[in-house]
Amino acid sequence: MSAPRPPCPPWCTADHEFLASCTSSGSPFFIGSDLTATMSAYARRYPGAGVEVAVNGKLHLGKPREAEALAVLLEQLADATPGQHRDLAGQVRAAAALLGWKEEG
Ligand SMILES: [Zn+2]
């Protein structure tokens, strides 16, 4: 039997029937004309542990080897527009702000 979960923070949008950690919602975007990669960033709190800003990069490939998948992600990032890079940076900052983190000078 596990310990009861503390109340969710106001930014949590997780469906706890399927996910133990609290997460904010990111805004995934597809990179590339063939939609083979998505990226997003969000805040996360693990049960009984700390908080973090998670950055997800997903590859939608059949059976890639790890090195090949990393190469594809890097090539996809090279194809992302400057606006998509700024959008991801904004999502990282928004997720950090949800956690009350401030930029260090
Ligand atoms: Zn939650």
Image: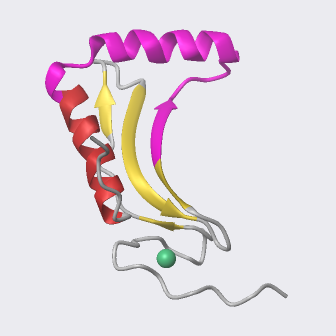
Quick check: 92 above or below 45?
above
Answer with left or right where residue 31 lies relative to residue 74.
left
Quick check: 70 above or below 83?
above
Answer with left or right where residue 16 lies relative to residue 26.
right
Q: Hey, which quadrant is residue 90 in on the image?
A: top left
Q: How is colour applied across the structure in the image?
A: secondary structure
Quick check: 76 above or below 53?
above
Magenta-colored stretch includes residue 71? yes
Quick check: 75 above or below 10?
above
Please state the horizontal and vertical placement of residue 82, each as a whole percent of the image.
17, 20
The residue shown at (65%, 11%) is 67
Task: Farthest residue to the front: give it.
Answer: 105
Pick whichever, 39 or 61, lies toward us: 39
Point out the image quarter for the N terminus: bottom right
Magenta-colored stretch includes residue 63? yes
Point out the image quarter for the C terminus: top left
> What range is drawn magenta here?
54-83
Q: Hey, which quadrant is residue 85 in on the image?
A: top left
Please state the horizontal and vertical placement of residue 36, each as a whole percent of the image.
42, 23
The residue shown at (33%, 43%) is 28
Please state the horizontal and vertical placement of residue 41, each as a whole percent of the image.
38, 46
